Amino acid sequence: RIRLGNLSMDSHPIHLHGYTFTITGTGAGPIPKSAQHQDVTVGVPVGTTRDIEFVANNPGDWAFHCHKTHHLMNGMAHDIPNMIGVTQNPETTRKIQQFIPEYMPMGETGMGQMYHMTHIMPRPPNFLPYGAPGQFGIIDMSGMFTILKVREGITTYENPGWYDNPPGTVAHKVNASEVPSEL
């Protein structure tokens, strides 16, 4: 069981990868069984709670986050579009900032390459770096994002480390020599 509480000033659709869960409660108390339903995302309005329940029987490291992309990728800002894939440069940024003074462009490939962090403005002293070390490199998320770690036999709250993915279950870059000639 996980209880989600929203003390922010915006609603958050909270999403869990790897599982379907049952929404079992709100700030008003338990939801009657006849009204409970399964989902993978639950809306948590301002000033409310939601309870979700699931059987943790799918081992892995699962993303658990707000499904509003700007709550992950733009430092929680709402008036700034996600610009993944758009070439960033200081002149364009200055032009946009004439209309949206708070505009800080993302990196061309996401949060990990936040252009403004190195080219436009210094990072505020109380601002944590975007991304965190992950099993396969930097996890380029910020804001409302965490990882649910599910393992068989967990008996403590200690970090179990990164999941040991079974062979053949992790994507990898394919070299040209690995591609069959008939493709």
Image (cartoon, rainbow, N blue to C red):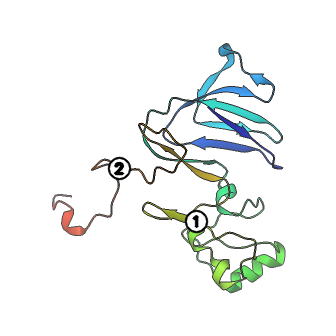
Callout count? 2
In the displayed structure, would residue 27 be above or below residue 110? Answer: above
Where does the image place residue 178, in percent across and percent down from the top left?
Answer: 20, 63
Please tell me whether mark 2 sits on a helix, a strand or a loop.
loop
Q: Residue at x 80, y 36 (%)?
A: 48
Whether residue 77 is visible here, answered yes or no, is yes
What amino acid is found at the position of numbered circle 2 in the picture? Answer: Asn
Residue 111 placement (x, y as % from top left): 60, 67
Determine crowd level at label 1: few under 14, some 14-19, many 20+ residues with C-alpha closer than 10 A: some
Q: Is residue 69 above or below residue 51?
A: below
Crowding near pointer 2: few (<14 within 10 Å), some, many (20+)?
few
| Quadrant for the N terminus in the image | top right
Q: Quadrant of residue 143?
A: bottom right
Instruction: Choose between 34 and 26: the one closer to the eye.
Output: 26
Q: Nearer the viewer, residue 77 or 123?
A: 123
The amino acid sitting under disc 1 is Gly
On the image, numbered disc 2 is attached to which residue? 165
The disc label shown at residue 141, or none = none
Whole-percent x, y for residue 174 in the image: 28, 64
- Residue at 52%, 48% in the rendered image: 158
Which residue in the rendered view is the most extreme toward the top?
34
